[in-house]
Image: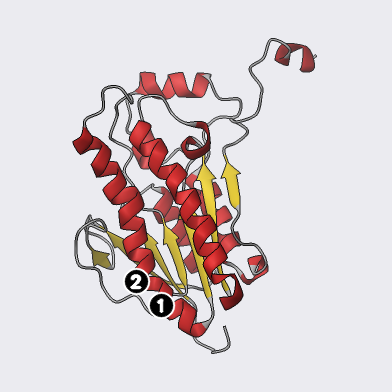
Amino acid sequence: MTDSRRRKALVTGAAREGSIGKAIVTRLEADGLDVITLDRSPGCTYQADISADELPPLDDIDVYVANAGLTTMFGAAHSMSIDKWRKDLDVNLTGTFRVLQQCLPGMRERRYGRVVVISSTAGTQGMPAQVSYSTTKAGLLGLVKTVAAENVALGITANAVLPGMTASSGILSMPQDIQDAWLASMPNGFVEPADIADAVAFFASPTARSVTGQFLTVDAGDGLNTRTVTSSVAQR
């Protein structure tokens, strides 16, 4: 950026206390950004369903953090209804794209922008019984690569953060037996929302000006091969 105004950031899906979105807002504000929020729930700057509602003007946004998304459409590939499939796609993919289209023209005109998409390890590993969610999170990675390539000469970067199982308000509201089962399978416990916010802050910062089209996994080591029969030997 060549002007002296504070950078302006938009974070979607940031209304809920204890959420990844809230943690991102807190971190970006601490870094000196002017942060606005957009969510379908009250308690944010703009209240709207990003998949269907008319969106506010966003041509002054310098940093777009695409965090809004659904994780509630449970179903396997052989049994999920088309309505549930579409609901995840409408919000996680189409909604993210609709907001991006509102932000990109201003970024391109100013020749500056940061696009940070919150995907998921489900997008690279898959997740049984969440076929639509995993598909959308994989699709977001293709979006990031394409936007990065289309705007690489215009001072605009696009990157993705892939959280593992995170101790957000949504996860912590699950029944305790489900939480315990997750924790039993993880080598280092849940990721904290602040950990995701730190990764976002890096991609949004001037330090990352040469980093684009990249995916950063933040999963506390859950994706490592720590469950083989030789794992116990390695700890001796």
Callout 2 crowding tier (Cα within 10 Å): few <14, some 14–19, many ≥20: some
Q: What amino acid type should be assigned to the residue bearing mark 1?
A: Pro
Residue 168 point in image, percent of width and height: 41, 41
Q: Position of residue 138 (x, y in %)?
A: 46, 43
Q: In this view, does 155 lie to the left or right of 43?
A: right
Disc ID at residue 15 = none
Q: In which quarter of the image is the C terminus?
A: top right
**Quarter of the N terminus within the rendering:** bottom right
SS at mark 2?
helix
Q: Mark 2 points at which residue?
A: 102
Indicate how the structure is coloured in the image.
Answer: secondary structure
Q: How crowded is mark 1: few (under 14 residues within 10 Å), some or many (20 or more)?
A: some
Q: Distance between the residues labelled 1 and 2?
A: 7 Å
Residue 105's mark? 1
Q: Where is residue 235 in the image (x, y as percent from the top left)?
A: 76, 17
The residue at 36%/68% (across/down) is: 101
Q: What element carries label 1?
A: helix
